[in-house]
Amino acid sequence: MNAPVRLKTSAMIASIAAEGQRTISAPFGHALAKAAESRPRIVGMTADLGKYTDLHIFQAAHPDRFYQMGMAEQLLMMSAAGMAREGFQPWVTTYAVFAARRAYDFLCLAIAEEDLDVKVVCALPGLTTGYGPSHQATEDLAIFRGMPNLTIIDPCDAIEIEQATTALADHRGPVYMRLLRGKVPAVLDEYDYKFELGKAKLLRDGNDVLIVSSGLMTMRALETADALRADKVDVAVLHVPTIKPLDEATILVAAGAKPGRLVVVAENHSVIGGLGEAVAGAMMRGGVHAPFRQVGLPDAFLDAGALPTLHDRYGISTKAMTDNIKAWLAA
């Protein structure tokens, strides 16, 4: 009798790219190394995760400006604050769970309260690893949205990571950016896209559904729009890379542009405290009343497993989002 096939879980740094999808390798590491060529204030710092946040690219290009702080995230944040006070611009990398949960107080009081020029760039946001709750940062946006002075960025793809890194190097102040690392899909160049800090962008228009999305879910939203076209469902996609400060003006215009159009907020984050609730609050304050639904992760500790399986299970795959939107329209 043959032994059953043992399914493997996804790797810690599993790619979200579909088979055959165009990707760019380590866009953050290469963009930061390039930005540092003309910006001597930039230094790179990490908590034993240079290889897993693509900061090793920066290390190779600028070894005298790279600092390995070991597995001590609180020390990492405090050291970055000290470097910023001395006139440097530290770019700090770790996993999102460690920045949000383990080092929150240090980032809050040493960096954000002092409004220091520190960029905190974190891998494994939301459900981008199959290693279970210890590494799945499903609530990082909820944790950080309430922190004064902190700008929050959730880029969609490799193109936007490159553009955002350059833009943030010219921006003064504390920033938290979610990072897709490794071989990252490239999709936004097909839409003549240019990242602007604090701005949402309408990538495509449509009469039946408006998907307001951030991060990798914008890629899923565009795929969903293509899939629904076969069912004669016309889908608009509004990409919101800056979670804070939120571009409420653009969101309100889009949400109110076509009365009766279903508004769906899609995010790689818990439905508690993220982009969905931010958009809903903006709509209520702005007097925009439209049918509203959320695509996001449940308020729960998620399973470990292979990423495609988990994305289907928790509703953030293209198929799951497509099926849900069709059901909402039919209800």
Image: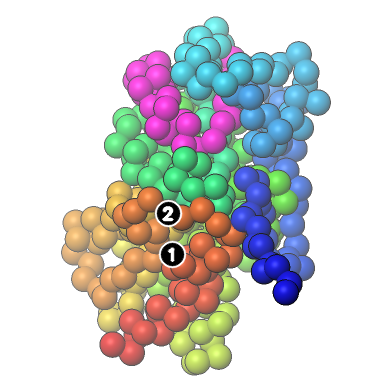
Kind of residue indicated by mark 1? Tyr
Q: Residue 159: image x %, image y %?
A: 67, 52
> The N terminus is located in which quarter?
bottom right
Under mark 2, the amino acid is Leu
Residue 227 quadrant: bottom right
Q: Give me the C-alpha separation between circle 2 and circle 1.
A: 8 Å
In the image, 262 versus 245, the foreground residue is 262
In front: label 2 or label 1: 2
Give the camera-side residue of 76 and 156: 76
Q: Is residue 231 visible?
A: yes
Q: Secondary structure at mark 2?
A: loop
Q: Is residue 278 left or right of residue 314?
A: left
Q: How many marks?
A: 2
Q: Is residue 238 magenta?
A: no
Question: Where's residue 224, x and y in %?
Answer: 52, 76
Provide the residue span drawn in magenta: 88-115
Residue at (55% x, 66% y) in the render: 309
Element under label 1? loop
Residue 275 can be seen, yes or no: no
When the figure is inspected, residue 117 is found, relative to residue 122, above or below; the finding is: above
Residue 252: horizontal and vertical position, in percent?
Answer: 31, 62
Q: Residue furthest top?
A: 86
Q: Closest to the observer: 273 or 19?
A: 19
Check the image and report above or below for 122 versus 190: above
Q: Residue at x 49, y 92 (%)?
A: 232
- State which quarter of the image contains the C terminus: bottom left
Residue under pointer 2: 302
First along the sequence among labels 2 and 1? 2
Residue at numbered disc 1: 314
